[in-house]
Amino acid sequence: MKAIMSRLSFPTRHRLVFCSLSFLLLSACSEQRNSFLDPAGPIAAAQRAHLIEVFAWTMIAILPVFILVPLMFWRYRYRNRKARYTPDWAFSGWLDLLMWGVPFVIVGVLSTQLWKSTHALDPYKPIASTEAPVNVQVVGLDWKWLFIYPDLGIATVNELAFPVGASVAMDVTTDTVMQSIMIPALAGQIYAMPGMRTKLHVLADETGSFDGENTQFSGAGFTEQKFEAISMTSQDFTAWVAKVKANGIPLDATSYGRLAAASTGAQVHETLGSPQMPEGVLYFNAVEPALFANVLGRYTQGTAIPSTLQPGAVGYVPPAAAGANQ
Amino acid sequence: MKHPTLHPGLNLGPHHGEAHEDAETLAFGFWVFLMSDLIIFGLMFATYVTMANPMGLAGGPGPKDAYDLTSVFVQTMILLASSLTFGMASLAMRFERGRGPITFWLSVTLLLGLAFLSLEVRDFAHMIEIGAVPSRSGFLSAFWGLVPLHALHVAAGCLWIMIMMIQMRTFGMVPLVKTRILRLGLFWHFLDLIWIGIFTIVYLGALA
Amino acid sequence: MSELNYQHEVRGYLTGFGLALLLTLVPFALTVWGGFGSVTTFVVLGGCALAQFVVQLRFFLHIDLRRQKREDLQLILFSILLLVIMAGGTIWIVGNLGMRMM
Amino acid sequence: MIPDQLTHWLLGRFGVSSLPILPAIENPTTSELVAAGAALAVILGAIGGIAFITWLGAWRTLWRDWLTSTDHKRIGIMYVVLALVMMARGVLEGAVMRTQQAFGLNGGFLTPEHFSELFSTHGTIMIFFVAMPLIIGLANYIVPLQIGARDMSFPVMNQISLGLTATGAALVMISLLLGKFSTGGWTAYPPYTGYDFNPGPGPDYWIWSVALAGLGTTMSGINFAVTIFKERAPGMTLFRMPLFTWTVLCAAIIMVFALPPLTVATLMLAADRYLDFHFFTNDLGGNMMNYVNLFWLFGHPEVYLLVIPAYGVFSESIATFSGKRLYGYASLVYATMAIAVLSFTVWLHHFFTMGQSANVNIVFGIASMCIAVPTGVKIYDWMATIFRGRIRMTVPMIYALGFFYLFVIGGLTGVMLANPTISYQVHNTLFLVAHFHNVIIPGVVFGLLSGYHYWFPKAFGFRLHEGWGRLTALLWIFGFSFTFFPLYALGFMGMPRRSASYTDPAFEPLMLVAFFGAALIVSALGSIVIQLWVSVRERESLAVPLGDPWNGRTLEWATSSPPPHYNFAVLPQVEDRDDFADAKAKGRAYMEPDAYEDIVMPNNTSLGMIICVSSTLLGLALVFYIWWLAILATGVIAVAFIARTFVLSTTHVIPADVIAAEHRAWLAGVHAAGPITRDAETRSANHGLASLELPTLAGAER
Ligand code: HEA
Ligand code: HEA
Ligand code: CUA
Ligand SMILES: [Cu+2]
């Protein structure tokens, strides 16, 4: 809870509004940061600011309803013979102008803000940062996330680490049904679809660990498809990369095939992982360079993909593991 | 009757009395149905357009391989002629020329409709032969979703013509029969309108 | 109903048929033999199809701006508006998505 | 293996394993037991229903007076009954889901599979088989009465529409007994619902129930549109139509134009699954994004289709119970039309996060917010209607009060969602779930419930019990608030929708609050059943046969309760917007006409039932790949349809003297009765004749 309250650093005129929103969150005291109302990066912060702005503007049109409705129901109750009664009154030009005009103006104001914010927060747009950006290729699988760092030659399952202050540029796809990736404390979501590549940029301006998830229902293991996004200092990040390199296993067609089979992160950790990898997480060191391109390109080659070769499909057969340990 | 026309499109004319008045709701209702159908076709067209690119083709046979433009042209001519002959049937009914001319023009229309269908089926068979089947690509799925849907409508129209010819004989030109032929006319002309879209977008547009 | 009227109506159908024929032949010839740029071709194709649409509505289906009861004509125009929104929107949206997913 | 082939040919892929009772016996987990219990409930319900009808000895009546009837009033009532049966299931599923999530920290008692079946059936049932049939049923009953017509334009088509809706509902119900329903949500996005990922019968059940019911709805739309355009009583110009009729007209237009995209999307999905097409598959050029696009081309107008008639109900009941003319009639009409048209321009707001460019999102975001303007105008118009009125706090007004407060909050969160940048965060979360229940329950459900209370006496000749009605309304309002406001917070905390379970302990307290709310909602449901039971028992003292219990303003109150088969002995001559109020004020009401005439009414027919039964069999055959049955059922439908066109005499005549006798008897009752003032409205003195206590003299102040 402290975490949320200590972040009340925005202008006071918003404070009241924000408090009325966050009273709903009073019971939310988890250690993990998982709400854009408690942002850890510029995008989520801008989204929260925008939310508050929309809320404030609409109040102009909505508060009169809240205030006048009970007053009128009381004043014009049947038994109150003192109140004026005008059964045939049914039109007033001025009132009509007000009724159409006020919402119209508000929607006009909100539209310009919508315009600006949508352009500014387009997930395809790189985020300006002082640190060097990190490229990540994201593959959604049933029911886990695979993160490939093409420039570093490593990959992970269900753990996305990056230096604080660096723009993380994600290329997103899936090798199964449609999914949607989101790290609420940093930025919004984008769909992941087979054969297609969408983009998402996030940036954390403080270190910490944030929940990431798939929000698009994708089958029985859907609720398990969570990951951790960890923002760390550059030194820590270098150390982390070294750790992944040291403890990882190779990511080739065979191990990828086993990853792709329908299973949760915890389950693949059981079969492929080692004690050096965190719970539910996998590390890979030798990553086939064209892996992402292959996952993406497979669907657009013009050949049919039988269900035996389609990860996630009923009847999918992972490629035979030559010399695999099971 | 003050209004010579009670509803959009073909009208029987006031001298048809009850049939003319009944047609007001019946024909209007049929127009609403046609407009709903128009949206179905419109979305099939839109899907076809979004599929007519290398991604949708998926390396399968494309317009150049699959379409026989000469045959399509002949089909267009046949369908256009059938619209004219149906018009003659409508006029024969409107001006009360008797059952003979109506039956004659309806039969001609029916024959033209069947000729159109057999040419189209021949084209479909050719496409199947060269492997341009719906299971080959998204583009071909869109084609096979759209053009045969129109063909199905034409087939239904042909069946409807046959039923009307029977009902003309058994019931005579009672109001119910007249209003049905009126709606059949709307249907038939509507199918010609859809075909303009198919001819232009599916065939010429994909080849241009 | 007079004969004159009948002749008049037949002539209407024939006019429509002639115009429709012309509006079919032009785009056909253009696609098969014309070597114009594809933009010109598309514009002519679209133009002819629209014109033929109007011709058939006018001469075969007897829709015109004068004689109809207004509410019914509005139905047709409204349908066309929605058709444009839905089909046009679909092409725009799916096209835009396609471009951004390459 | 000849016998094997034979069973395969006969039964397709249907097998013993399709019965849910077996797994429950083999492996009695809670989840399986819940499923088996549901199946058992369906069987027992069906047996109970059959036994009850037999006990009443009502089979003949049921067939002759109801199932084969072409009377819009009976068809309307059958729609409502169908919806209530489906509602029982939809509500229980909602309650089970809330229970699961209340105890869903690291698990819960349902398997994820079972939970996903629940939200899929719940969403499908609530939208297609509860809300839609309720609205269509209500409109069926009321609209011809409001415009002074004898029936719908196409009574037989009306019956077929009902038949096809019942087919869809039957398929969803049967899926509890045979096989399993889809797990893909009410939106059924491929590729998840494609053959590769879900080869079982589930998605096929979804496809055929929705497609067949959708066809019925399209026909209803055509029917309403033509009826309202062509069957109005003399003098009833468009701008004299009651607001409810206007809203049904707009809803009908949405039905005609928004159902086709659903038909296209479902049939394309079917083509992918059955015929190896590639509209939406992963490979060979399929494009699932087009499915999403097509589905919401339907889906968005659909939800406005639900709410627009509810706006109509509020327009009628607020004016009546405020004893005033409706403020801003023209504004309300234009606002309704604006909402209907705009509803076709915003569908992309359901997938802002798919990756299209900012400009596309901006266009659809702004269009979505624009709907707030006409909706706001409506809210303000209703406020101006109660302004300087004489408000009676009857049940519909309690719902109206709840609506004012709660719906506006739901609309506000809708406006938030219309901003792409915010939608990026809360899309697919419980915030969205809270939003749409927050507009659907206070908007659609409260509207329907208040319409139910308002028009019930018209349909059955007696009022509903007022006290139980008030209790129900309050339970609804508070139950709703407790159930769904916590979900906003959970959505802000990032909990995805359609989650069977969660791992964050912070969610639990909010979930328990929501659970408490759901319990209140279930007791509201109990209370409404008790209300009906009490009302039926006390129907003598609640009777309002003279037809006008609320001092109504529109034509449906100008005839007896329940109205005669032909609605009006003589078609009314309309002179004013609120014609019946005007008639009462000017003494035009309750007059005996100069002459009675014969009335021609449509005959009964069994076509609707034939189509209903055969298309249900067709659906089942398609789900289980029983091809011979599919062909047979299609053949029966085609033959029945064509055979019907060979029937020439489709009407019968009610002679003028019969009508005269009935009408004079009712008028005698009216003249004998004492009119009551509004403070006696909820007492047994109310026989349906209103005194002119609230005069329509301009500016009167008493
Ligand atoms: C009409 C629509 C409707 C209605 C009324 C409801 C009512 C309720 N819904 Fe509904 N719900 C949906 C439509 C609706 N829902 C949809 C579309 C989804 C999404 C499915 C998906 O994910 O694909 C959903 C999903 C959904 C979820 C899943 C959330 C998730 O994704 O995690 C849950 C969970 O608790 C839930 C709960 C409830 C509850 C407790 C009610 C209760 O309020 C139930 C109470 C309702 C009634 C008691 C009946 C209503 C009464 C009437 C309609 C009028 C009666 C009229 C007369 C008597 C004349 N709903
Ligand atoms: C009856 C049904 C109904 C109604 C009336 C509405 C009304 C609105 N809805 Fe809702 N909506 C649904 C049912 C409904 N919705 C459903 C079922 C879904 C989810 C489906 C699914 O995914 O399963 C959904 C989802 C949904 C989304 C997609 C969210 C997402 O998936 O990320 C969006 C986004 O724009 C949205 C917006 C709106 C808006 C702007 C309105 C507006 O019409 C609201 C207008 C009303 C007001 C604003 C209040 C009154 C106005 C005033 C007092 C005056 C002035 C106000 C201003 C000037 C702001 N809705
Ligand atoms: Cu889906 Cu690109
Ligand atoms: Cu919407």
Image: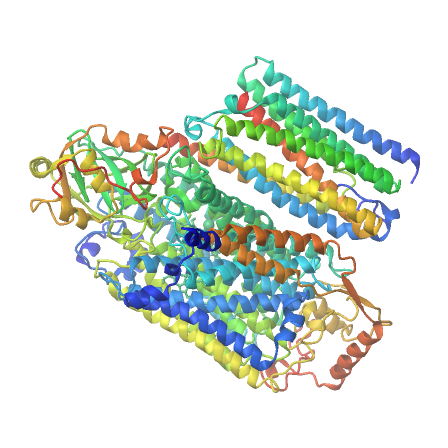
Q: Is residue C77 above or below residue A133?
A: below
How many marks overall? 0
Colouring style: rainbow
Q: Position of residue A267 (x, y in %)?
A: 18, 50
Side of D205 where A2 appears, left or right = left
**Is D503 or A41 nearer to us in this picture?**
D503
Question: Can residue A18 be seen from the camera position used here?
Answer: yes
- What residue is drawn where x is 37% and y is 42%? D353
Q: Position of residue A83 (x, y in %)?
A: 57, 74
Identify the image quadrant of residue C62.
top right
- What residue is drawn where x is 49% and y is 37%? C90
Side of D86 where D516 appears, left or right = left
Q: Is residue D695 above or below residue A326?
A: below
Question: Can residue A91 be seen from the camera position used here?
Answer: no
Q: Position of residue A197 (x, y in %)?
A: 32, 34
Q: Position of residue D338 (x, y in %)?
A: 57, 49
Side of D18 where B160 appears, left or right = right
Side of D593 where B25 appears, left or right = left
Identify the image quadrant of residue A67.
bottom left
Q: Is residue B165 above or below residue A61?
A: above
Classify the position of the C terminus of chain A by image quarter.
top left
**Is A40 or B93 nearer to us in this picture?**
B93
Identify the image quadrant of residue D382.
bottom right
**Is D450 or B72 nearer to us in this picture?**
B72
Q: Residue furthest front?
A: D2
